[in-house]
Amino acid sequence: MLNKFLSYIKKLDEIALKILKKGIFSCFALCIFSCIILITYLLFIHTQYTYLLGITLFRISLIFSIEFIICAFVSDFIKNGISIL
């Protein structure tokens, strides 16, 4: 299963791969920022607002990274006419 996934990534179109890499990088940056907020909550500021902000940003970054992966595959499948079934 993992080998099949990696082979799909290697076969992606150049534009889809570029968008995928930039999207994953921006989501990773957002994830790091949310971790910094959560560490700040843990060490210094103990308010519910900081905790909820950090958790929400972390969840959003994970959701966006999954959406970038799915959209890159779907756009490549549509472009190449590959049937998923």
Image (spheres, rainbow, N blue to C red):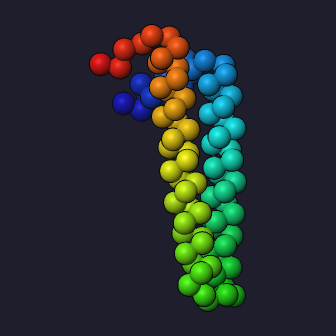
Q: Is residue 12 above or below residue 19?
A: above
Q: Residue at x 67, y 73 (%)?
A: 37
Q: Quadrant of the N terminus?
A: top left
Q: Is residue 58 above or below residue 38?
A: above
Instruction: List x then y, in percent, for residue 60.
Output: 55, 57
Horizontal placement of 43 versus 78: left or right?
A: right
- Specify whether residue 7 is in view: no
Q: Nearer the viewer, residue 9 or 64?
A: 64
Horizontal placement of 42 versus 7: left or right?
A: right
Name the residue at the top extreme.
81
Q: Residue at x 61, y 89 (%)?
A: 46
Instruction: List x then y, in percent, for residue 25.
Output: 68, 44
Instruction: List x then y, in percent, for residue 44.
Output: 69, 87
Write down the quadrant of residue 35 in the picture.
bottom right
Instruction: List x then y, in percent, for residue 65.
Output: 55, 45
Q: Quadrant of the C terminus?
A: top left
Q: Residue at x 54, y 66 (%)?
A: 56
Horizontal placement of 71 versus 83: left or right?
A: right
Horizontal placement of 81 versus 56: left or right?
A: left
Q: Nearer the viewer, residue 38 or 76?
A: 76
Q: Nearer the viewer, residue 51 or 43?
A: 51
Q: Nearer the viewer, residue 68 or 2?
A: 68
- Specify whether residue 50 is in view: yes
Write down the quadrant of residue 33 in the picture.
bottom right
Q: Is residue 61 above or below residue 67?
A: below
How many marks the image carries: the answer is: 0
Q: Residue at x 63, y 42 (%)?
A: 24
Q: Is residue 48 above or below residue 67?
A: below
